[in-house]
Image: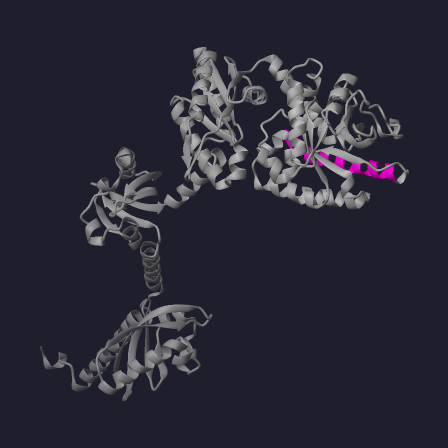
């Protein structure tokens, strides 16, 4: 190169300046590209002020660059207050140690007030001769939220898994436990380590194992199912479970099954108890009427398919009330349970023995005709007759049985058997009766009377006829017997022996007896107020009335309301009442005597009265039954019995009244035997109060 072509010194300086300028421009472009425009938020802080921010940070926080550089936005304005101390601590530590870069996370407040999670990465450096912090800000909100959700999910899972009172567990594909919660440990009685070495199979009761395996296999196929299963706990206790199985999916593959088990033992026991209450008698555990009727309906369907016949036996215990009254309800309950067991043992396995109420039972024989039913009834009567020990007492009661048979469905078969039982009870206890149309008609009439008796008092259908009782020595009227009559609007005058027994069975005798007592006492007081010589009014009372807890109080109140003195009232009880050996009866009789009321025994000689009763209760009179008086004319044993009763009564300090005197021959004999009083058609028929002539009567 010639000297003329070589650059001069001046030219060299000019070239160097140009190069430097070009490099400076290049660096500035690179800075603009890498720092200002880079999608990473960057800043420089010195003396607690922002001295540089790039566009990305301005966009992230929503502020203008000038707001940062002019000091309008400072560190405390963008850092969440609770996190400001974290940033200040890090700045202080870096300043003291001149350490390297640090990275930490804080919450930042944007210009619009929204909150974001950011990661700060800063390093201490020098800016214009002063310490400065150079750093970047990265938005990590999505990551933090995702982590928070994951943490919440884990906490919920742990809460559901570990705190759940139900048993939660997981199995591998072989049915081995892979995890269990505390609820499963408490339920099974096994420890965690023990279950981790076990399969669920040995725990399931044998009869439920096939079902459990089926549903486990179904879960491994991707299905969710729910079922009930029984298993044994570690202590051998039977546990009833409701189990939900569902598949365990991992990376798209079923690797086992999850399970949730709820202990339903108590629930099932409660359900069983409710079913027993709805369908079984609580005392004997026999089917009740509802379940019995359902089984009868099913038996009808089967018998129709096979063209067979079935039978229903209706049973009622004879004199069961005696056990409750004399020994107490505890004895009665024990007896019912034992006799129920005997009945079940006595019939075939296909039969149904049910208890309807009190001492009423029914037996369904699904494959039995009339002959088989009769044989069963005979066998039952024999079983009932065998004594059984009840709390130290030997007890044996008989039963009245009714039988109804059918080959086709009949809604009233039970009612027919009950009608036959009622017939047995009335005519031949400790036996059986077959249902028939005639028998049903008698029962229907009885039920009609029972139904219509309820309205008889309200409709003023009852009336009283009075029959005089004559003093056989003076011929004067000494008493009137009040005899109830029922003037039925359709049937006419219904005799007492048609409706009184029914009223006693239904309990209506209490209300009817109250009406009779009040009406008779009122009438007697009315006669006295009319100026007639006073005499006794005799009123018949039944066992049911006498056993009523308020009867003595009733008698006393009637006397007070009517104003009749107690000495002018005589209560008549039948001889059979004294067979009821109860303290209630004895107490009532004593209290009535204490009121000053006369007491007499009606129909004497027809029963089995113990002389001990006559001595205990000191009856004022005995009434000789009309059957013995009628035998006087025939010179039969009636004379001897009548004479004996009169002598016995007089020796015991009681007077004697002869019933049913119809002629002078009978009257003469009774007068000769020193009978005290008499009544009958010979003197007067029973008639209404206003038809009686109350002038002194003398026919002796």
Q: Camera-side residue: 277 or 660?
A: 660
Residue 335, given in percent of the width and then of the height, sits at 45, 35
Residue 284, given in percent of the width and then of the height, sits at 45, 35
Q: Is residue 394 left or right of residue 486?
A: left
Looking at this view, name the residue that lies furthest to the bottom.
129
For the stretch drawn in magenta, what is the main secondary structure? helix
Q: Camera-side residue: 165 or 444?
A: 444
Q: Residue at x 35, y 39 (%)?
A: 228
Residue 7, given in percent of the width and then of the height, sits at 15, 81
Q: Is residue 345 left or right of residue 527?
A: left
Q: Name the image colouring.
A: one colour
Residue 234, given in percent of the width and then of the height, sits at 24, 47
Q: Residue at x 47, y 70 (%)?
A: 112
- Image quarter of the N terminus: bottom left
Q: Is residue 192 left or right of residue 302?
A: left
Which contiguous range is marked in magenta? 502-528
* Magenta stretch contains residue 189: no
Q: Is residue 488 visible?
A: yes
- Image quarter of the C terminus: top right
Determine which quarter of the picture holds residue 459.
Answer: top right
Q: Residue at x 9, y 79 (%)?
A: 2
Q: Is residue 58 visible?
A: no
Q: From what the image shows, is residue 152 above or below residue 220?
A: below
Looking at this view, name the residue that lies furthest to the front.
672
* Magenta stretch contains residue 514: yes
Looking at this view, name the residue that lies furthest to the top.
307
Determine which quarter of the picture holds residue 92.
Answer: bottom left
Q: From what the image shows, is residue 41 above or below residue 125?
A: above
């Amino acid at each position: 190169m010639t000297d003329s072509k070589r650059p001069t010194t001046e030219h060299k300086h000019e070239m160097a300046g140009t190069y430097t300028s070009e490099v400076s421009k290049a660096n500035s472009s690179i800075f603009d590209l890498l720092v200002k425009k880079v999608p990473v938020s960057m800043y420089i802080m010195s003396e607690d002020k922002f001295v540089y921010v790039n566009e990305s940070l301005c966009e992230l926080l929503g502020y203008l660059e000038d707001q940062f550089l002019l000091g309008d936005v400072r560190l405390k304005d963008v850092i969440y207050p609770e996190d400001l101390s974290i940033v200040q601590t890090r700045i202080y530590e870096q300043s003291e140690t001149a350490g390297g870069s640090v990275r930490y996370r804080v919450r930042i407040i944007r210009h619009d007030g929204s909150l974001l999670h950011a990661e700060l990465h800063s390093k201490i450096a020098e800016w214009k001769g002063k310490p400065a912090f150079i750093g970047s800000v990265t938005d990590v909100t999505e990551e933090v939220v995702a982590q928070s959700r994951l943490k919440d999910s884990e906490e919920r899972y742990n809460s559901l898994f570990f705190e759940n009172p139900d048993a939660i567990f997981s199995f591998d594909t072989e049915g081995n436990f892979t995890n269990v919660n505390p609820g499963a440990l408490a339920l099974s009685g096994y420890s965690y380590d023990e279950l981790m070495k076990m399969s669920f199979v040995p725990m399931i009761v044998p009869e439920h194992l096939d079902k459990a395996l089926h549903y486990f296999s179904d879960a491994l196929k991707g299905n969710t199912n729910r079922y009930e299963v029984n298993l044994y706990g570690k202590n051998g206790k039977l546990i009833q479970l409701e189990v939900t199985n569902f598949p365990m999916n991992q990376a798209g593959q079923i690797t086992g099954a999850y399970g949730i088990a709820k202990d339903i033992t108590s629930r099932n026991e409660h359900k069983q108890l409710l079913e027993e209450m709805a369908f079984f008698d609580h005392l004997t555990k026999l089917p009740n009427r509802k379940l019995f009727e359902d089984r009868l309906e099913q038996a009808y369907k089967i018998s129709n398919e096979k063209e067979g016949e079935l039978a229903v036996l209706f049973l009622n215990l004879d004199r069961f009330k005696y056990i409750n009254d004399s020994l107490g309800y505890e004895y009665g309950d024990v007896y019912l349970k034992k006799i129920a067991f005997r009945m079940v043992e006595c019939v075939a396995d296909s039969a149904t023995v049910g208890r309807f109420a009190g001492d009423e039972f029914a037996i369904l024989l699904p494959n039995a005709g009339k002959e088989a039913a009769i044989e069963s009834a005979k066998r039952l009567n024999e079983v009932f007759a065998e004594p059984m020990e009840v709390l130290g007492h030997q007890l044996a009661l008989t039963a009245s049985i009714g039988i109804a048979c059918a080959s086709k469905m009949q809604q009233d078969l039970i009612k027919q058997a009950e009608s036959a039982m009622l017939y047995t009870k009335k005519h031949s206890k400790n036996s059986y009766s077959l249902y028939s149309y005639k028998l049903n008609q008698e029962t229907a009439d009885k039920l009609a009377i029972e139904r219509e008796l309820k309205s008889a008092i309200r409709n003023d259908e009852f009336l009283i006829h009075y029959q005089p009782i004559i003093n056989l020595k003076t011929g004067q009227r000494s008493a009137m017997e009040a005899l109830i009559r029922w003037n039925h609007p359709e049937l006419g005058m219904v005799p007492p022996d048609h409706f009184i027994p029914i009223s006693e069975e239904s309990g209506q005798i209490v209300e009817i007896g109250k009406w009779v007592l009040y009406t008779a006492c009122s009438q007697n007081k009315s006669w006295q107020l009319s100026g007639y010589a006073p005499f006794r009014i005799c009123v018949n009372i039944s066992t049911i009335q006498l056993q009523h807890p308020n009867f003595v109080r009733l008698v006393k109140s009637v006397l007070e309301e009517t104003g009749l003195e107690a000495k002018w009232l005589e209560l008549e009880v039948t001889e059979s009442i004294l067979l009821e050996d109860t303290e209630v009866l004895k107490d009532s009789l004593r209290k009535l005597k204490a009121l000053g009321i006369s007491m007499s025994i009606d129909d004497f000689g027809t029963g089995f009265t113990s002389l001990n009763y006559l001595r205990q209760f000191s009856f004022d009179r005995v009434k000789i039954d009309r059957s013995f008086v009628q035998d006087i004319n025939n010179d039969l044993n009636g004379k001897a019995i009548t004479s004996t009763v009169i002598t016995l009564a007089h020796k015991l300090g009681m007077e004697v009244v002869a019933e049913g005197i119809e002629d002078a021959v009978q009257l003469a004999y009774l007068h000769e035997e020193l009978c005290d009083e008499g009544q009958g058609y010979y003197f007067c028929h029973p008639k209404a109060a206003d038809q009686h002539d109350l002038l002194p009567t003398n026919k002796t």
